[in-house]
Amino acid sequence: METSTDIRFLDVVNRRLDYVKAYKSTEYYKATCYMAARWVSRWGDLRCQDLTTQMIEKFLIGRSRNSEFAANKDLRHLRATFNFGKKRKLNSNDPTSGISFFPVEKRIKYVPPAEDIDKVISCAAPDVQDYLWAIRDTMARVDEINRLTWDDVFFEGATGYVVLYTRKKKGGHLTPRKVAMTQRLCEILKRRFVGRNIALPWVFCNTYVNTKTRERKCGAFHYRKTIMKTLCTKAGVKRFSYHALRHSSASIMANRNVPIGAIQKILGHENRTTTEIYLHNLGNIEREAIAVYEEATRNSHTDSHTVLPFKANG
């Protein structure tokens, strides 16, 4: 049996990929595989103990020349891989320890206006329209809608609710939360329920070809980022992703003074600070502060030391 002194880096990477595939989202797994291929092409046959901080830094500096964001992403995942191995006593060292993240220029994320989202959805095929409305009206993550089954849909009262499951919680546990349905989403899901294939448990399905057997199969809806790119081009609007639907809906609620605690629960965030990142509105308190400043500086003779009243609403 290999010990922490002679195990190959490739073996640690593969062990972590198995873990990520089992406990993380499909997109997270794909992204990790993509990065892991780069690492393994360089260090796959090396023993973990032979990997040095200098080797990792050289690789990351090269990545940073194209994108600091990409270099930081590699660093996060490399660090997670070595920590994974240490916890399981596969390796004893972590050559990423002490390496700092590259400084980046942070920008406010683009959130499309509601009318652009409407245009994009109207350009989609009927089945994709239903899918996009489900994401938009629940503010769900793509994986949460992809794994949605009819057992998670409850038509109760005027509309009902859906149960969404996420692995974003600490520890990677698959955690449920209830989200009330809009009238629009309720009507969409009732229509789909009537016309569903009873042999398939998922609300949204698609047909795909198995790359190994070339056999056509029908399964849960797969993440396909090209859909949004194509639809945005067709609609003639600035390109945005599935995730922008989540940001947009959260901002709409915040602009209408929905309490941030309610938005946090719907989005499925553990921390309020994460929810605040999603809220791209300019709040009333900021507007009122600027109004006070404007009043104080409107006339050239205004005394700069004049104290004007300012009432914060929280």
Image: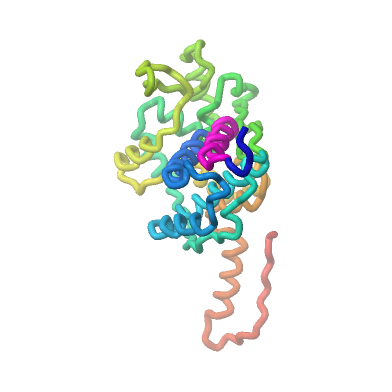
- Does 301 appear above or below 198? below
Kindly identify the residue that appears in the image at 52 percent across and 86 percent down: 300
**Nearest the eye: 141 or 24:** 24
x and y percent of residue 186 in the render? 54, 26
Kindly identify the residue that appears in the image at 63 percent across and 42 percent down: 4
x and y percent of residue 109 in the render? 47, 54
Q: Is residue 23 magenta?
A: yes
Question: Looking at the figure, which quarter contains the C terminus?
Answer: bottom right
x and y percent of residue 179 in the render? 62, 33
**Nearest the eye: 101 or 10:** 10
Tell me how many marks there are.
Answer: 0
Kindly identify the residue that appears in the image at 60 percent across and 28 percent down: 162
Task: Report the span colored magenta.
Answer: 7-25
Q: Is residue 264 left or right of residue 112?
A: right
**Nearest the eye: 45 or 80:** 45
Q: Residue furthest top?
A: 199
- Say if residue 207 shows up in the picture: yes
Q: Is residue 306 magenta?
A: no
**Nearest the eye: 1 or 310:** 1
Question: Looking at the figure, which quarter contains the N terminus?
Answer: top right
- Does 174 appear above or below 97? above
